[in-house]
Amino acid sequence: MSAPAIVRVRDVHKYFTRGSERIDVLQDLNLEVMEGEFLGLMGPSGSGKTTLLNLIAGLDQPSEGEVWIGDRLVSRMSEGELAQWRTRNIGFIFQFYHLLPVLTAYENVELPLLLLPLTAAERKRQVLTALDLVGLSARLSHRPGQLSGGQQQRVGIARAVVTDPTLIVADEPTGDLDARSAEEILALLDELQRSLKKTILLVTHDPRAAGHAHRVLHLEKGQLVETARAADETRIKLG
């Protein structure tokens, strides 16, 4: 029996206005992501990859259409509902880490938990588990400036998973790393998907990074095109 769809994007259109000009970014877009799937999103700059990621993560709302995560229609939530929902359901991994430089690794990972009704003991258990998962148990007292880029991104990943979110969304998570560190981070994402059955949405320009995904979609002129994992370049329109 196949896994259920955890993400359902239905007839989504997203446009912006600049003066009297309307700029269409996403057009009549449909997408389903299965629970536990590792999905890669590629496309040229300005193609709408990050816009789509933000719609799924509840950071933005479509101009038209619906975005469902599980049984929740997130595209119709209020700002207050979205903020609460994101804390529990979305783990964010950023290209430039977005760690607070004055906080230790432990404190940076703990931040999302401060928004949840947990005791100090419960927060500590979850933070230590997350840091152990990314191999940084020995660095929990270090501040970002004392860590390498790869280690900082591991802290970012620990922060993303510490709330046990429904989705992990990663926007160019290896874009600021050297090749070796990037491969280590991608291997860690692979392990999160395998061991924790996490659903991961990865935006990347790097074909090597996209190669870790189960499925790769390309955004072209506001539409999604699927690239087969085989060596051929056959593309199938999603409909």
Image (cartoon, rainbow, N blue to C red):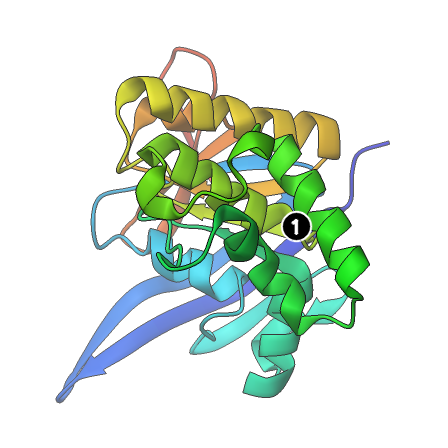
Q: Residue at x 37, y 46 (%)?
A: 144
**Looking at the picture, does residue 162 appear above or below residue 116?**
above
Is residue 98 at all visible to an observer of this figure? yes
Left or right relative to 91: residue 52: left
Q: Residue at x 38, y 60 (%)?
A: 102
Q: Nearer the viewer, residue 189 or 228?
A: 189
Q: Residue at x 48, y 37 (%)?
A: 154
Residue type at mark 1? Val
Q: Quadrant of residue 195?
A: top right
**Looking at the picture, does residue 21 appear above or below residue 182?**
below
Number of marks: 1
For the N terminus, which image quadrant? Answer: top right
Q: Going by the picture, which residue comes out furthest to the right?
A: 1
- Give how far across and how far down residue 150 sits, in percent: 37, 31
**Looking at the picture, does residue 87 appear above or below residue 126?**
below
Q: Nearer the viewer, residue 143 or 233?
A: 143
Q: Residue at x 56, y 49 (%)?
A: 106
- Asked which secondary structure carries label 1, the reply is loop
- Give how far across and how far down residue 124 sits, in percent: 72, 52
- Give how far across and how far down residue 143 sits, in percent: 40, 47
Which residue was labeled with disc 1?
162
Q: Quadrant of residue 172?
A: top left
